[in-house]
Amino acid sequence: MKLLFAASECAPFFKTGGLGDVMGALPKELAKSGNDVRVVLPYFVQKLSREVQDELEDVTSFTVEVGWRNQHCGIKQLKRDGVIYYFVDNLFYFDRENLYDYGDDGERFAFFQQAVIEMLETIDFIPDILHVNDWQTAMIPVLLKDKYSWINPLKDIKTVLTIHNILFQGVYDQYILSDLFNIGYAAFHDRGLKYGDNVCWLKGGIYYADLVTTVSPTYANEIQTSEFGYGLDGDLQNVQHKLVGIVNGIDYDTYDPETDETITEQFSADDLSGKIDNKKALQKRVGLPVDEDVALLGVVTRLDEQKGVQLIVEAMEELMKYRQVQLVLLGTGKHYFEDAFKYYTEAYPKKCKAIIDFDGELAQWIYAGVDIFLMPSQFEPCGLSQLNSLRYGTVPLVHEVGGLVDTIEPYNKWTEEGTGFSFYDFNVHTFLSTIDDALITYYDSPDSFKKMQIRGMKQDNSWEKSAQGYMDQYRYLIY
């Protein structure tokens, strides 16, 4: 099968969140089973290492009309792990410090999406499936059926749209239809791009794509409600016949406690002694008292309300004063959250250490070294941190939303089942009560806690399993 993924980010080249992780892992996994898999990305030159830039080959170049503008488009290529990566080169649009958050993002990604379609005949690759991701590429299914429908080789392409986070939708003034895409109003209607008086790229993709997927079954249901749909819940209800949730996986080659050279000591489900060594090394690294017996809580997150950070802040005084715990937090985000954790680090230096930074290596140390991982997200399409925790024998404590519901089985002390702890009511009292349940199990039933760690490590959250879910959907579309 010929598969082309279009996205705005992809690990290890450049990423800001879960989309980058998915694009870094899913295409590689699909290529292992013999598919012809390719990925097309913007050429964010400032984010690419010199080593990667030196590997790139120039494939072709042409001009893309962005409304009245004639813009140069170069296509560069890189082959890695059985996947061909294309980079759409235009320095005016993509030679910038950050990936997003510029006043001309609409124009930048209007150019990119048209370039993706117009490069297909030029590079002589017409995919069976063109899989787009989030608002930055959601116009591609619309353009294929509207602007480019007269091109015969493109008519049979099936399109898949994956919504990684419905919060971001690509809403613009309707003038962009002519000003950026050179199209009229054929797609500007209630079951298309029309979003009040504006244009919504994600809404257009939802209606025009042949299949819409999200990154967990529970999230697929949640976004059809007013609480989680952010204005598109009615539209998703309209297309529920083609809406599917497939849980993300994690890269088991990269995240493997038996071979991971990032952490201090390797370990396995058969021998957790190395995990204790990682715990002590983490305590020493961040400046907490080295004590293998104390319950060490970990947090790796963006400091934002979406991640439920307000619950952690509200619980901190109680945790620090009245619980036998240590807490290590890694993340950056809103200044008032950063300030709160700086305060608790100063107020309780023997119990709390907040590192206001982004550090991939330290994140690995936390996954491998802590006993309990806190993830009280207000909403979470899929989540990867809880999967990383399971892989490294760390027990997740999560809010029952999205992919967290689909991946964490609540602990049952009577049947000795479950892989973590979870709570439903989103308030600090329920959150603290659930932490207490975890601490009681940790201190009073250490054998049960250890068995829970081992069950988590043995759970299959690999991309091999998730990739099979996508292949089943692709075959359904084509055959």
Image (cartoon, helix red, strand yellow):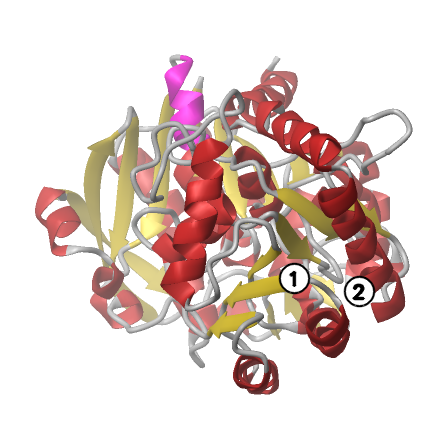
Q: Is residue 260 left or right of residue 148?
A: left
Which residue carries the number 2 mark? 231
Q: Which amino acid, mark 1? A: Val
Work out whether residue 413 or residue 184 is closer to the camera in this orientation and state it.
413
Q: Earlier in the sequence, mark 2 or mark 1?
A: 2
- The main secondary structure of the magenta stretch is helix
Q: Residue at x 32, y 28 (%)?
A: 125
Would residue 31 appear left or right of 75 to someone viewing this image?
A: right
Q: Amino acid at mark 2?
A: Gly
Q: Is residue 302 above or below residue 104?
A: above
Kindly identify which numbered label has been placed on residue 397.
none
Q: Which part of the image, by quadrant, shows the C terminus? A: top right
Question: Residue 27, located in which quarter of the rendered image?
Answer: top left
Residue 325, numbered circle: 1
**Crowdedness of circle 2 by 10 Å Cα count: few (<14), some, many (20+)?**
some
Where, quadrant-wise, is the N terminus in this rendering?
Answer: top left
- In the picture shown, does residue 193 fall above or below 151? below
Residue 367 appears left or right of 263:
right
Q: Which residues are magenta?
A: 26-33
129 inside magenta stretch: no
Residue that appears at 80% across and 59% down:
228
Horizontal and vertical percent position of residue 472? 62, 18
Residue drawn at the location 65% of the way across and 42% of the way down: 395
Crowding near pointer 1: few (<14 within 10 Å), some, many (20+)? some
The image shows residue 75 at horizontal and vertical percentages of 22, 47
* Closer to viewer: mark 2 or mark 1: 1
Of the pair 165 and 420, the residue shown nearer to us: 420
Q: Secondary structure at mark 1?
A: strand
Q: Nearer the viewer, residue 376 or 75?
A: 376
Q: Residue 254 at x, y = what percent?
A: 38, 35
